[in-house]
Amino acid sequence: PSQTEPPWLRGLNPPQREAVLTTEGPVLLLAGAGTGKTAALTARMAQILYTRQAWPSEILAVTFTNKAAREMRERIGTMVGSAVEGMPWLGTFHSIGAKLLRRHAEIIGLQSNFTIIDTDDQLRLLKQLIQSEDLDEKRFPARGLASLLDKWKNAGKSPADLDAADNEAFANGKGQHMYALYQARLLALNACDFGDLLLHGLNLLKNNRDILEKYQAQFKYILVDEYQDTNAVQYLWLRLLAQKRKNICCVGDDDQSIYSWRGAEVANILRFEKDFPGAKTIKLEQNYRSTPHILAAASGLIDANSARLGKTLWTELDDGEKVRIIGVWDGPEEARRVGEEIEAIQYKGESLDNIAILVRAQHQTREFEDRFIQIGVNYRIVGGFRFYERAEIRDAIAYLRIVNQPADDLAFERIVNVPKRGIGDKAVEKIHIVARAERTPLSVAAARLVGTDELTGKARKSLADLVVDIARWRDEAATMSPANLTRLILDESGYTAVLQAERSTEASGRLENLSELARAMEEYESLGEFLEHVSLVMDNDRGDTGASVTIMTIHAAKGLEYDNVFLVGWEEGIFPSQRALDEGGLASLEEERRLAYVAITRAKRKCTIIHAANRRIYGQWTSSIPSRFIEELPLDHIEAEQTMTGGASLWRANWSEQTDPFAHLAAANQGRSNARGPGWQRAATSGGFNPRPQRIAENTRSAVSLGNKGRSDLSI
Ligand code: ATP
Ligand code: MG
């Protein structure tokens, strides 16, 4: 390295440097977490720009999230300065697809000002189509069709590309027909959905030689981050665009493929060398992010997966602390404990910005949010809404507010037709007119209105039912616990049923949030007291100013890093998720394990894993079993701690056979010496660990040559 070298090259290690400087020809950078893949990709872009090998507009760079695109843009800006005016083709596949499509909309049959519809619009549209075809919506719900469409579009299939099985997948052989109908309808509306941003883009390139050639010539360099999570349609895009110049650099990590449920195919990594013969594969082995114990814990864990390419990771960082495993009594104690830990970190002068709490499922954020508000710790939720701002929670709370307070007009308006019960705008307008004329709240006006013949048919009947329901719920509120009242209202209003009928991942997330709401209410004596709490929480929105703890799902944390990471709820049924356990297959369990690997490798200095001995489920206390992933962590790199009240479960003997919910307490009394079951010994032998330079968790399943075609154990 010479003195005059540009700054982005200076700190790079030899393989990183190779990845940056090998600008010509296909390059696959395949390496574990924290080895500087994204850093190398960014430097590569700076290098290309700096050496004038291409103008900004001649580089196509794909990131997994918009946030990652923003950060990359900023970093390149600081590297090569403002001379680089933007990078017009730096973004997610979807944003790049939208841009491409706006330019050539007419070829697809759209106008350039087409609308991108959201999920709600899409469902409404599908519902209409299902009705117009005289199909039974109950048997063939719009949600089901939506997820099929999504799957087909991710696979790069247009209606004509569907096979017999696809066609059978909806309404006994109507798959193709409905798909074609839907696409035609979208075109007529001058609209497209998210999947179309990719699929239309692909068809545009596939079916129009001149356009394809234009972009093949324009994009001198193509760069892709998080390549392991590309799906088929994205892969086909890349293959078409890179076919002429072949200057494509993809970076990824097979162990971090966590989006197979969205059609991502880790096998794309294996196809790369086949599609781009002579591709140079570069591996990075030095990890710059995490201390040795953290890295060894993560490596030992992922070692249990069978579908892997295998890799070696080492670090020069100081040992640091072992991964801490903390067992607590229950959910509230988990939140209290994390709160205390955070205050201690803060006390040492560290910023809250360096702290992240990673959850497996969105609904888990609630307990932490409540606690942080209580103790005045700023937090932000990345990749989602704060718990009490989520639509279904607001709906549920609106029901509770109108039960609690008849004059709450805002609440009444929010729920009067949610779920849809045929009370349209016209009817609502009439309620308003009565309310104004008689100076009464809307709910009182509604009760008056149903006694007249101002309203007719469905609207009148539905409104009458609602008025009666609200009155009954109000009576119940006098005796019933707030939590049970909430469950009752959600059931009787039909709210739960609508979500259940949808049978989608999103709907089940919403249902989980609603049960979490009821769980939260167990802590309150009266409805009034709970609603008071909610309004304080809602008022607490200080926005994103100032340092804050980050709370997010593991999925949203991909590619990010924090000094202190708290991994909470590591219990069977939460993580691995109940869904993964129910499916029972090896593939879904291995994907959960990759998720655990992503989670641990977000930590730079301190990683704390927490599990609770008890969780409240539907108002019942249930004892929970620590996640199998805890057991799989190599013993040399973890340090288990129990609190006075909980955590005894860590000292389980044969927890998998344990049926007595209190057996873990008994086990705790047996003392430490004989408490480690066979599972712990198994774990102890897996992650061998040597002194520096640390070669960690050498994968004994010999590293597979990437050129080895036809290997099938990776197509998971
Ligand atoms: P992930 O798999 O989680 O996406 P990654 O491989 O993309 O990780 P980066 O995020 O690029 O890793 O880098 C991890 C950390 O290591 C960052 O803080 C980065 O600044 C630092 N880093 C990368 N390369 C070097 C290097 N050569 N010298 C020092 N630090 C480095
Ligand atoms: Mg990265």
Image: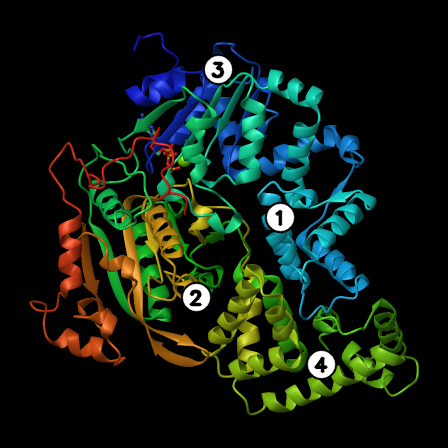
Q: Which residue is mark 3?
A: 48
Disc 3: CA contacts within 10 A as few (<14), some (14-19) or many (>=20): some
Mark 2–mark 3 Cα distance, whole angstroms, equals: 47 Å
Q: Specify the amino acid type for callout 4.
A: Pro
Mark 1–mark 2 Cα distance, whole angstroms, equals: 46 Å
Q: Specify the amino acid type for callout 2.
A: Glu
Q: Disc 2 or 4, which lies upstream in sequence?
A: 2
Q: Specify the amino acid type for callout 3.
A: Ile
Q: Disc 1 or 4, which lies upstream in sequence?
A: 1
Q: Disc 2 or 3, which lies upstream in sequence?
A: 3
**Residue 245 appears left or right of 306:** right
Dots 2 and 4: beta carbons under 8 Å?
no
Describe the element under mark 4 as helix, strand or loop. loop
Q: Which mark is residue 88?
A: none
Mark 4–mark 3 Cα distance, whole angstroms, equals: 65 Å
Q: Quadrant of ligand 1?
A: top left
Q: Which residue is mark 1?
A: 163
Mark 1–mark 4 Cα distance, whole angstroms, equals: 56 Å
Q: Which residue is mark 2?
A: 367
